[in-house]
Image: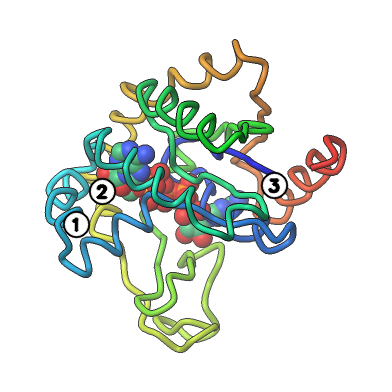
Amino acid sequence: MRLIFLGPPGAGKGTQAKVIAQLFTAAHLSTGEILREAVKNNTEVGKRAKSYMDKGELVPDEVVIKIVAESLARPDIARGFILDGFPRTEQQAIALDGELAKISLAIDAVIYFDTSAEVSIRRLSGRRVCRKCGANYHIASMKSRQEGVCDICAGELYQRDDDKEATVKNRLVVYERQTAALIEYYKNKGMLETVSGDLDVDAVRDHLTALFKAKRL
Ligand code: AP5
């Protein structure tokens, strides 16, 4: 399977990408995670990306396109992949087509997580992430067994800087301004499949797995 997960911040793209990647043994490529790792390691890419991410703005296209081009050269890509949070602009979408053409691959489907702003805000303001392994939790809907401690690796759970209220609001504005047009873009190409991101985690997973089985992915 070769998929794009598209939708507003907090739609559940990352949560479902992890589950589906495991179920279908595909690679999970999250540009957000790659960028956060670069910021943590203070690499050149991280230094360039940080100020944009802190404000909830998009990192410049050429930076993320290069990251994705490098990721597509990974050997595990042959098993299939889920692009989570990329593309986010039309320029990125066009560049992705070019990169995939170079390696004779094509996207099977674009999954749009249709999610209300209210749900996005509620999820992001309650999200907690493990500092060590990156696992995602939510203080109300996906609690860890022990408060502040990761169930998987016992790492510390923290709130992402860009999940603070003002930044979340800006990320939603940025999504509407720069990314939402991709829904129409992929619909016109006949590639778009829509799921309700407002449903609970298991319901979204079941909807997706049924869809992928029907499409024989
Ligand atoms: P990124 O990390 O991609 O952030 P995002 O798209 O804003 O997505 P999120 O991670 O916030 O949400 P999600 O949909 O993955 O939701 P999640 O599953 O975590 O990007 C961060 C930044 O990096 C960007 O702002 C930008 O600066 C930069 N960047 C990244 N890619 C870029 C690109 N292509 N171009 C330019 N810049 C780029 O779930 C959220 C919470 O809800 C969690 O707590 C989870 O436990 C909970 N939850 C999930 N699903 C459900 C459910 N169904 N029911 C109840 N709770 C749920």
Q: Which residue is mark 2?
A: 165
Residue 59 in which image quadrant = top left
Residue 201 in which image quadrant = bottom right
Q: CA distance from mark 3 to mark 2?
A: 26 Å
**Residue 204: image tag:** 3
Q: Which residue is mark 1?
A: 46
Residue 181 position, x and y percent, is 43, 17
Local crowd size for mark 3, using a 10 Å CA cut-off: few (<14), some (14–19), many (≥20): some
Find numbered disc 2 in the image and state the secondary structure of the residue it sits on: helix
Comparing labels 1 and 3, the label whose residue is closer to the camera: 1
- The residue furthest top is 188
Q: CA distance from mark 1 to mark 2?
A: 23 Å
Q: Earlier in the sequence, mark 3 or mark 2?
A: 2
Badge 2 amino acid:
Glu
Badge 3 amino acid:
Val
Which residue is located at x 55 percent, y 38 percent? Answer: 103
Q: Earlier in the sequence, mark 1 or mark 2?
A: 1
Q: Is residue 173 above or below residue 49?
A: above
Q: Earlier in the sequence, mark 1 or mark 3?
A: 1
Which residue is located at x 60 percent, y 41 percent? Answer: 198
Q: Is mark 2 within 8 Å of ligand 1?
A: no
The reply, left or right, for residue 123 in relation to residue 214 is left
Find numbered disc 1 in the image and state the secondary structure of the residue it sits on: helix
Badge 1 amino acid:
Gly
Which residue is located at x 39 percent, y 31 percent? Answer: 88
Kindly tell me whether residue 121 is visible in this rendering.
no
Quadrant the N terminus occupies: top right
The reply, left or right, for residue 76 in relation to residue 20 is left
